[in-house]
Image: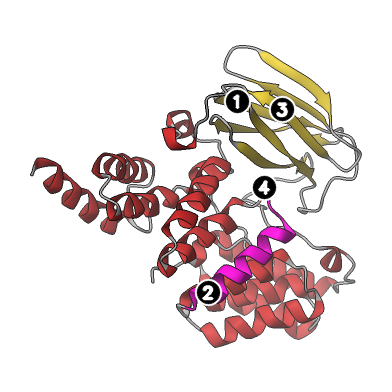
Amino acid sequence: MKTITQFSIGLALSLAICGVSRAQENIEIDSKYKTADTNNAVIEGRVSLPSGFAAERFAKITLRNTQVIISTRYSSKHGEFRFDNLSEGVYYLQADVPEFEPVEVKIALGRGITSEVNLQLRDKKLAYVYNTSRVVSVAELRQAVPDAARKEYQLGLKFVAKSDVTAAATHFQQAVTIYPEYLAARNDLGAQFLKLKRIDEAEKSFQLVLDKDPKNFNAKFNMGLVRIERKDYLDAISQLNQAIVIDSTRPVARLWLGVALLESGDLLSAERELTKALVMGGTECIAAQYHLARIYLSRGDIADASRAVRAYLDEAPKGEYANDAKELEKKLNQQSRN
């Protein structure tokens, strides 16, 4: 199994925010996911604070396409919003809340698709050097973390942004030594252990978080990754489904659910989840294209497989699956010539 922890939600990773890349304009929704009705797609979601916690306030939401503003409305007081009766196409969704930087995402919407979006605000006073896409639970927010532990945790995040796994783990370990109840630090320490293939220690870290906070999305998602590393795909499917119940707006959970379903042999369900991940996550979940190519090849759809693997290589020429994708493309080219 390839290294999977680059997608770990519990970390501040330097991945693209969903749908910001130019390549999303070229996402083509397969005809099998379209319906006869051209105006029945939906965009729904919520606005969250820089911490990841739901914005308990009204937010101005603007929906536009490449030419005009389609609709401007306000979210509910919990930051939730929904746009119905949309046609297939590329949309831009922007959230405006006083005292925060406006945030905008790009969405490639197919017919009949419901796209779930999380619009995460940015504080005007902070200079963000990494993507703060992690979800923060209520239990985490209520913790009275000592300043010394918080300082070690922030240092750990900086080393995560630099891809220095060992240094990051050292600072996260210091944080939990100072404050053993520090849920965020324990989760992110576990994520470093997962990258270092210290699977037992990673599992222990995530379980300690879940014992204190059973609805912690980060730990539940990461526990699913542990199960994938162990090739226990049925339990991975269970853990990832539970993570999606906690927060359905996080596309990487659907990506890895799709991978687990694929490895377990449930190709139809795997295709469904990988497609959802790609539509919701865009370039954040571009690996879904590679796995979809595997599915298409297994059923003899050479053209679809070729298109999917090429889409992956175009967007991630040095990605995690780049070498495997190149080999797969060679195989597909040979088969198409025969």
Q: Nearer the viewer, mark 4 or mark 1?
A: 1
Q: Residue at x 62, y 50 (%)?
A: 129
Mark in the foreground, 2 or 1: 2
Mark 3 or mark 4: whose residue is earlier in sequence? 3
Q: Which residue is mark 1?
A: 91
Q: Looking at the image, which residue is at 50% across and 62% down?
A: 6
Instruction: Report the residue marked by disc 3.
Output: 84
> Is disc 3 surrounded by few (<14), some (14 to 19) or many (20+) residues within 10 Å?
few
Q: Which mark identifies residue 234?
A: 2
| Image-based side of 143 in relation to 3, left or right | right
The amino acid sitting under disc 2 is Leu
User: Residue 165: x percent and y percent?
Assistant: 52, 71
Q: Nearer the viewer, residue 147 or 38?
A: 38
Q: In 3D space, how far apart are the residues under numbered discs 4 and 1 (Cα atoms)?
A: 25 Å
Query: What residue occupies the far left of the structure in this picture?
Result: 338
Decide: marks 2, 1 in contact (CB < 8 A)?
no
Between discs 4 and 2, the one toward the N terminus = 4
Tell me the distance, in whole angstroms, between the alpha carbons under discs 4 and 2: 38 Å
Disc 2 to disc 1, C-alpha distance: 36 Å
Quadrant of the drawing holding the C terminus:
top left
Q: Amino acid at mark 3?
A: Asp
Q: Is residue 95 above or below residue 177?
A: above
Q: Which residues are magenta?
A: 232-249
Query: Where residue 159 sits: x, y (%)?
Result: 58, 65
